[in-house]
Every structure is written in C-alpha cells, then in structure tokens.
Image (cartoon, grey):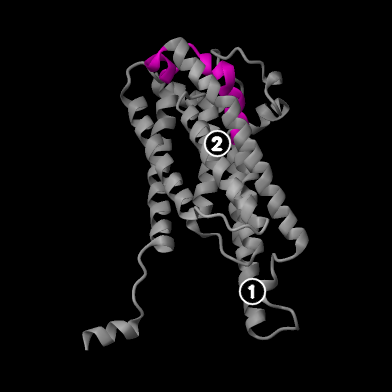
Amino acid sequence: MAAIDIVSLFTRSTLLPGSTVPVADIPLGGMYHAMMRPYSPVLGICAYLAMVKIWERCNARQAIVVTKGAGPGSTRNSQGTGSAFKAIIIAHNLVLAAYSIWTFVDFFPAVLRNVQMQGLKDGFCDNNWALRNDKLLVHGFLFYLSKYYEFIDTAIILAKGRTAGRLQTFHHSGAVLIMWLGNYVQSPYLAFFVFENSIIHSLMYTYYTLTALGFKPPGKQILTRLQISQFYVALSAGAVYSVLPGCQSGPQKLFTYIFIAYILELIRLFTEFARKTYGVRQPPPTLAVKKEA
C-alpha cells in the first residue's frame, strides 16, 4: 500500500484532501499546478547546474585571456564591480531579508497557536491539518518558490569571476528538490524548514545587505555556526518524526528520510567550509623548518 501511495505521488499536482485552503487563495497560486508538477524542480535544477557549468567555463576562459595580457582594463577583478551590479546585490539581499522576516513574523504565531490548540504531540504531527491550513500550505509554497529566486546568490558569485563550489550548488539545488517534495506530500516536517530557515535567512541576508552597503558588521563566523546549528535541530526533529507512530503517511516518511540525508550532507559541507575558513591556520613552511632545526 505504501508503495502504491508513493507511486501515486507523480500523478497529481493538487492539494491533498486534508486541505481546506483553495489554491486560488495562496499567493502566486496561479503558478501552483505548474510548479508542483514533478518535472518542474528537475528542469529548474538542470537549468541551474547548466548555468553554473557554462558560466564557470566562461570565467576560466576570461582568466586565461587576462593572464595572457589582453587589452587594457581586462582584469578578472573588474567583473562585478560596477555601481549597477552593486545595486543589484543590495536589492537582491534586501528582498530576501524582508521576505524572510515577514515569513517568520507571520508563521511563528501560527506555530504557537497550533501547539496551544492541539498539544505538543498532535501539534508536532498536525494530524488535523490545523497548521497546514492555517499558514504552512501558504508559506511552504512561497518558500519553495523562493528557492528558485535564491539561484541569484550563485549568479552573483559567478558574476564576480569566482567558482560556485559544491557547497553552493548542492545547497541551492537540493533546497529546491526538498521544498518541492515537502510541499508535494504536504509533510508537517516542512514546518521546521520554513521556521528555522526564515530565522537564519533573516539574519544572513540582513548581514549581506549591510556588507553590500559598505558596512562591516561582525558575526560572519556566528552566522555560519547558526546555519550548522539549524541543521542539527532539523535533524533531531526528523528523528522524532521517524519514530512517532501515526505521525506521517508513507510518502511523508519518504520525504523525511530524504530530508535527513540532505541535512547530513549539508552538515558535512558546512563544517568543512567552516574549518577551512575559520580554522586554525598552519604556520608557514619556513617557520616549521626552523623549529625542527
């Protein structure tokens, strides 16, 4: 029966029967059916990865030309330094900061109401769809759409002449797939992603907005640690969802397992990034030789 349920996932693009929210009432609901088709995240991710590959090749070729001394002003560092480009970066980060703050402010009271009405366990599982019909269906779908918009993060990096890297591409492409699947099966576990991510992104994109404006706020290392911490919290929640009886349907359990696998890889990649970026620096080789002598 569970296998049949999972197979049936790929034959619909509508809300499940427990929903009382009309698609027309969801912001940007006119896009719902098209964006919830299984091919939508696949096409989006393929286009994103193709963009990264092509852009990185163009950057590599330009770097070769610059190295060979092509025309005046042809320096790699000249990429992404104009005032128009800076304005785009500021606007992009400001939009995501404002959106994330609005999501948290609007979604958090709904989470509290749900726990107060249903109790901790039933509120956690949302078996009567109270949270989903209140705010999660709306914010879950909008968060899914926002993951496509966040591809611009990578475009900005590439426009500066840098490479994207595995952390960047895995994070963004995986987020699209995870958010699509979570919305598709309408999992209560999705609430943790929306809730936590809105907090972290509120802080993160506010920080990026300030740096783009020329300020130098402290706390970059703290932001990275907060990102890693949110993954551990979501991982713990996923473990609870996995063992609570009657909390999830077969397709929702599948989503939980995929989400956990995604989180584990993100923890590895972010920890590796933090170690390389903020870790203890090794002494220069010359100093090491002197010490041995």
Secondary structure under tag 1 reads helix
Q: Residue at x 64, y 42 (%)?
A: 96
Q: Residues within 10 Å of mark 2 (few under 14, many from 20)?
A: many
**Which region shows up in magenta?**
119-144
Query: Residue 120 appears in which quarter of the rendering?
Result: top left
Residue 116 visible somewhere in the drawing:
yes
Q: Which residue is mark 1?
A: 61
Q: Residue at x 42, y 49 (%)?
A: 225
Residue type at the position of mark 1: Arg
Secondary structure under tag 2 reads helix
Q: Which residue is mark 2?
A: 198
- Residue occupying the far right of the picture: 84
Q: Residues within 10 Å of mark 1 (few under 14, many from 20)?
A: few
Establish if 120 lies above or below 199.
above
- Residue occupying the far left of the picture: 293
Q: Nearer the viewer, residue 130 or 163?
A: 130
**Residue 140 shown in magenta:** yes
Q: Residue at x 67, y 80 (%)?
A: 65
